Image (cartoon, helix red, strand yellow):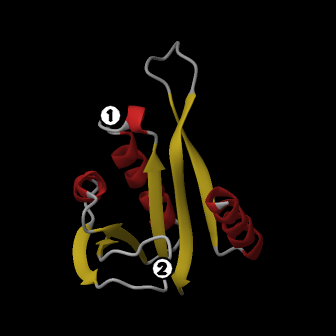
Amino acid sequence: EEQKAFLQKCQFRLHERTGFAAAIWFRETPDATHQHAGTITAATVAPNIVEMSYWLAESYIGKGIATRTLRLISQRLLDSGIRQIQLAIAVGNKPSRAVADRASYRLDHIEANDATHSYSPTARIVYVFP
């Protein structure tokens, strides 16, 4: 049910031109078959400001995939006229916080627990780029 709601939200954002979701594909070697490693999404939160999120399957964590993907998509968004990109990461999610650091995002502020975000009932650290 949660996945269905996520996909519906992605379809709505794409239709309304307020965001996107994309699969992250990876292959171990040039001759290997591409495998679906994860997902990256973006949603407009204010004029020229986008909030991005990403997810990787456990077997792909630690290979630099999220960092490279985040850098690439972030640069493309900036090149398209987006002024700022935000990441809102749960305080306890150290691997995702490390991705933000490696991708040159900077810590902006910490949001307290917010019941309006059913997907993130814990405090979140907001990173910004550039």
Query: Looking at numbered disc 2 in the image, what kind of residue is underneath it?
Result: His
Image-quadrant location for residue 20: bottom right
Name the quarter where the N terminus is drawn.
bottom right
In the image, which is nearer the foreground, mark 1 or mark 2?
Answer: 2
Image-quadrant location for residue 83: bottom left
Residue 112 falls left or right of residue 31? left
Mark 1 to mark 2 CA distance (whole Å) = 30 Å
Residue where numbered disc 2 is placed: 117
Q: Residue furthest front?
A: 1
Front-most of residues 111 and 45: 111
**Residue 49 position in % (x across, y down):** 47, 80
**Residue 26 position in % (x across, y down):** 49, 31
**Residue 116 position in % (x across, y down):** 49, 86
Query: Looking at numbered disc 1 in the image, what kind of residue is underneath it?
Result: Lys
Q: Label 1 neighbourhood size at 10 Å, few (<14), some (14-19), many (20+)?
A: few
Q: Label 2 neighbourhood size at 10 Å, few (<14), some (14-19), many (20+)?
A: few
Q: Residue furthest top?
A: 31
Q: Give the number of callouts.
A: 2
Q: Residue at x 48, y 79 (%)?
A: 117
Residue where numbered disc 1 is placed: 63
Q: Residue at x 56, y 28 (%)?
A: 35
Give whichever of discs 1 and 2 has the lower sequence position. Answer: 1
Q: Residue at x 52, y 54 (%)?
A: 40
Classify 26 as above or below 39.
above
- For label 1, the SS is loop
Name the quarter where the C terminus is drawn.
bottom left
